[in-house]
Amino acid sequence: MITVVVAFLVGVVTVRFLRVVSGEILASPALARRNHRDRVVPTAGGLFLILAVLVVEAGRAVLGAIGVGAESGLTEARSAVLFAVFGFGFLGLVDDLAAVGEDRGFRGHLRALTHGRVTTGLLKLVGGAAVAVVLVATPGFKSGRTLLVDAMLIALAANLGNLLDRAPGRTIKFALVAYVPIALVVGTAPIGVALAPVIGAAFGLLGDDLHERLMLGDTGANVIGAVLGLAVVLGSRDSVRLVVMLVLLGVNVAAELVSFSRVIDSVPPLRAFDRWGRARVTPSGPTGRPAPPAPTAAVRPTRRDGSRRARRA
């Protein structure tokens, strides 16, 4: 497991380095959104996650070319993780930048479609399904049922990452909880080594997310959910994947009917876990710092605001 731990730590260090040297990457007014407390926070923080994975894989390739490390080139698992990161990250970024209107959830996007409007959320759902199909088809021929189950698992996992991203740190926290059993099962298999730096980079962004210096946005939440789903697909047998897919399907359907935030707040252990580490709220703003200027009309509301535009897609 030493290899996996090192890969995880490399992801943490890489994303923190990128935060230091390119902190202004999220400074564009186009990324300004109101969070759950109406504070103006840059979204699409998942861009750092994508860049970190790219840097790590480039570093692995260079080291492999000079004879350092066990692998001299990209493994199939690392290629699949890279494709998932960029495919789902791109779709999430489109939604972060271009989402308009109040349509949310599967029903909201389908209702918009019946009125002749294609929402960015629908594009993300359809595009995510397409990316998932390509991912599971890449290793070789699969039967129709296996292809459908595996693709649905990845797409539903990505969407669940989005559904959880309604409060600071929530997606990363629950992803870390899910990662522990996955890491134990896949161990030092190629997918375990490929997954570790992605989750390490997500962990490296946890402090920024909790203290409202950025929001993952769909860009990051999409990626985190997708790579965890991909790890289950590449690291478990058919019966396990079917059960996981059905559970994810049930959770995604339940999200159309109930609020995850209300459920979490109603269960004391979940509520304590969800709120752990968040910025303290004081009259002058979080952690005693001066409060930011009041949001202007030019700042679009984020879908992390559960009371108005809950993240449902």
Image (cartoon, rainbow, N blue to C red):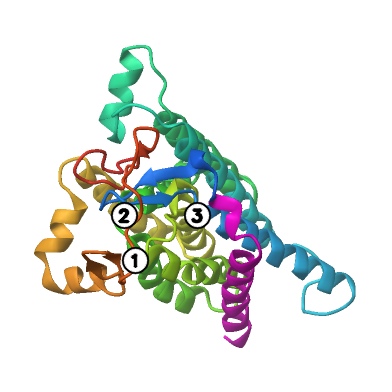
| Residue position marked by numbered label 1 in the rendering | 174
User: Decide: marks 2, 1 in contact (CB < 8 A)?
Assistant: yes
| Residue position marked by numbered label 3 in the rendering | 45
Q: Nearer the viewer, mark 2 or mark 3?
A: 3
Q: Position of residue 279 (x, y in %)?
A: 30, 69
- Is the magenta region chiefly helix, strand or loop? helix
Q: Mark 2 is on which residue type?
A: Leu
Q: Which residues are magenta?
A: 1-26
Q: Position of residue 124 (x, y in %)?
A: 46, 35
Question: How busy is the neighbourhood of tag 3: few (under 14 within 10 Å), some, or many (20 plus)?
Answer: many
Check if residue 19 falls in the magenta segment: yes
| Residue position marked by numbered label 2 in the rendering | 164
Q: Is residue 65 above or below residue 158?
A: below
Q: Mark 1 is on which residue type?
A: Phe
Q: Is residue 288 left or right of residue 88?
A: left
Q: CA distance from mark 2 to mark 1?
A: 8 Å
Q: Residue at 28% of width from left, 48% of height from top? A: 38
- Secondary structure at badge 3 equals loop
